Image (cartoon, rainbow, N blue to C red):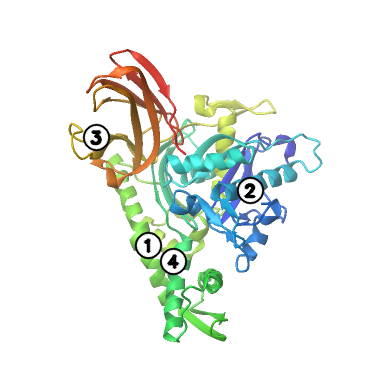
Amino acid sequence: MFEEYAAKTIGIDFGTNNSVVGVYNTKIEKPLVIENEEGVNSTPSAVLLREPLEFSDVGRSAKERAMLEPVVLSMKSLIGTENNGFAISREGVRFSILDAHKVLFQYLKRNTKTRMDPDGKLNYRTDKCVVSYPASFNLKQKEFVRRAAQSAGMKVAGMITEPEACALAYLYPDKLSEKPLNLRIIDLGAGTFDVALLSASKRQIKVLAVDGVKAGGDDIDYLMMAYFTAQLKANGIDLSGDKEAFQVLRNRCEECKIRMSAPGKEYDSIILYTPKYNKQVEIGISKADYHKLCEKLMQVKLMPVLERLAKVEKEKGVSADLTLLVGGSNVNPYFVNEFKKMYGNNCISYKSKEAVALGDAVYAYMLEKGIMKGLIYSENQSGSHSKIPKMKQVSNETLGLRILDGSGAGTKSYHVENLIFKNMELPVHIKTNVKTAYEKQTKVALHLYSSGSISTKMKLEGAQEVGTCLLRSKKPLAKYTTIEVELIMETADKIQVKALEKGMNQKVDVMLDLS
């Protein structure tokens, strides 16, 4: 093992179905995955809800009890949804989704500490981490992930999108040269689909574009559930309202999906017992029908993302030299074949379940050595110099301020004026002017909205509010008083707001509430 050569900051791939931890080895100059207590690389992102929440209620043991007890599954997919607040256990005890995430992160932290320093002789600490997030996440969702890690007792040294992390895992340490390599990342996971375009050389890794959508292997499970539910209804069996039967069916569909992804498998069936009808039924699916379900996901959710990426490639005049297929769902032959049809022979599968965690570990090491602050050379423990290029990132979302239409008289209506745009190179400092709407105003509320829009002005309904802040004036302000607002984004996971009341010439840093 390499405990004495481990970087001080761990990388966490917090996945929809499984989570993985990576640590950078400074001796061999490579990132490695840390096994869990069961000796496997990944831990199911599942938490059993019961008081008190304990480490034993996390992972495989929790997932296996999902049919009998209240278990939070695919909990990353709940971030930013209406279910973001609370999950209810069968005993009526209320647990916040943040509590469930906290316990998962505590488990990952504790397990890494135990595996790296079982005897405690090295005093190895796991209180700093890098966490990756889907390219479709907005500022509010990123902040939720940060809070979950912090509530588990870890300082979040940095955050990075999952496809960017995959690129780092592939590139470092031996895929970089003086000649830039244009790299396309296609990351199809259980709950998210992410893409990225990068140009990488020994001197610099430049992110050109990122994009994503909430879609993945779980969608195939749900499509299969609908397919089998229709078969059951044709046989006089209705599962409506039977949560336990639906959970059993969900598990059977996931197992069937895995079997249908095997070469030569042309037909598969599942056996389902329904206590309500006291019947055991067998239902099946052909490879052709299974592919139709995959095609539906491809056309409805994945293709729009790929088309947007292709548009960016055309606009920037960039042709990818290599396409990497990563993510747990990219082991599905249907999607692998479709992507290879699109991108040709320079399309390879790469460490589908580990790439993100390995890239997180590389990014953690970059932050640890100050690479993101402009250093190019870092010195390792042996005294030699390891070349790590600087990394230039982009915003993965468009951000703007809510503006009151017209004079403010009568019914209020608003629009969003976008200031920071998706795929804009970071760091970025953007200034704009807002005006007071009424006489004698003593405070002005700034509402920050996120979208994927490329328009400067857009309707409020097309964006999502991700944060607010309140400007307070020491004296009442006249109507139409000009206030200069500055948005500062150094990295894609944080934003800083500054305001200057021009009449008073008072500049203030404003705390943005992302909760």
The quarter holding residue 455 reads: top left
Amino acid type at mark 2: Val
Label tally: 4
Query: Which residue occupies 36% across, 36% down?
Result: 448
Cα gap from disc 3 to disc 2, whole angstroms: 42 Å
- Residue 247 vertical placement versus 393 (above, below): below
- Residue 358 vertical placement versus 179 (above, below): below
3 vs 1, front mark: 3
1 vs 2, front mark: 2
Query: Which residue occupies 67% across, 54% down?
Result: 51
Pointer 4: what residue? Answer: 334
Say whether disc 4 or disc 1 marks the residue closer to the N-terminus. Answer: 1
2 vs 4, front mark: 2
Amino acid type at mark 4: Tyr
Pointer 3: what residue? Answer: 404
Horizontally, is 424 left or right of 98 in the view? left
Horizontally, is 131 left or right of 469 in the view? right
